[in-house]
Amino acid sequence: MMRLFLLAALPLLAFALPTARAEDKPKESRLFELRVYTANEGKLDAIHKRTKDAGLKLLEKHGMTVLGVWSPVDPKDARFFLLLAHKDKAARDASFKAFAADPDWVKVRDESEKDGKLVAKAEEIFLTVTDYSPAIEVGDHDAGRVFELRTYTATEGKLDNLNARFRDHTVKLFEKHGMTNWVYWNYAKGTKGDDTMLVYFLTHASQDAAKKSFGSFGKDPDWVAARKASEEKAGGSLTAAKDGVKSVFLKATDYSPTK
């Protein structure tokens, strides 16, 4: 009889167990680093070969987490995009110092550059996730999908307004119109642009799909109303008049941890 009573009570106990809440999930506190390299003429393939054959392994060896590697869809664009994650800035600096001094890296670098430098320009962007960003999903996903890297420069004093509009409206409307939100960042505190910059990745089935999605998004009455209300509240446009919104379509490399 006692056994039957306990078995009967199990469903009730299940309802009594605590459930995970969104606020219970660990907050993403890592420092992200988006590294953008512009290759010297004819050297982009060599950068990819060096990165694929040795670079990623050496970065990981020195404590850095490689999240993704991309090339622009436009074949005329000679850039190379690498996304890393670090515990914090101190850990990042220590890792890169050890990486730069590693004899294995020095050997690889020197051998790859015996016919000339591979990189014409390198840019480092330090980023922290916004409070409305989804968790980054690393790994293989939809075959053939494209990533869209979008960079917004907020009008002076209006970054909080811009983040609020994305948090309350934009990210949901992107999903409504077939776009996938991958990550949203602001520039890390203490870096130039930390009061103006919003950077995020979307993914699409294709560039044509992206064009179609943004076309329907732009006409959505909910978006039109949200944009109007946010600009009225802020007293003007939330993005800078010149180069306020930039976009580049990217494809993950065959050796990228995220595809």
Image (cartoon, rainbow, N blue to C red):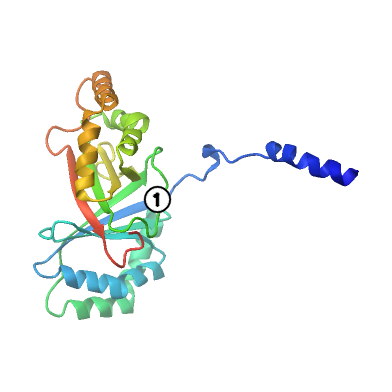
In the rendered image, which residue does mark 1 sit on? Answer: 136
Is 92 rendered above or below residue 115?
above
Please give left or right for residue 74 compared with residue 31 in the image: left
- Where does the C terminus fall, quadrant-wise? bottom left
**Residue at the image position 25 percent from the left and 37 percent from the top:** 196
The furthest residue to the right: 1
Q: Amino acid at mark 1?
A: Ile
Picture coordinates of residue 39, whole percent (x, y): 14, 64
Disc 1 crowd, CA 10 A, few/some/many (<14, 14-19, 20+):
some
Residue 210 image position (x, y, % from top left): 23, 44
Tally of marks: 1
Question: Is residue 154 at least partly visible in the picture?
Answer: no
> Which of these two is toward me, 170 or 11?
11
Task: Answer with the quarter of the image where residue 163 lies.
Answer: top left
Q: Residue shown at 12%/58% (left/top)?
A: 77
Q: Name the spot of residue 120 as percent of width and height, x first.
A: 13, 64
Above or below, comparing residue 68 to residue 43 in the picture: above
Query: Which of the 4 quarters of the picture holds residue 52?
Result: bottom left
Location of residue 246 in the rendering, given as x and y in whole percent from the top left corner: 17, 43
Nearer-the-camera pick, 251 or 111: 251
Secondary structure of residue under mark 1: loop
Residue appearing at x 40%, y 43% in the figure: 134
The quadrant of the picture occupied by the N terminus is top right
Residue 145 is at least partly visible in this image: yes
Quadrant in which residue 40 is drawn: bottom left
- Residue sitting at x 35%, y 67%: 59
Compared with 12, 259 (above or below) is: below
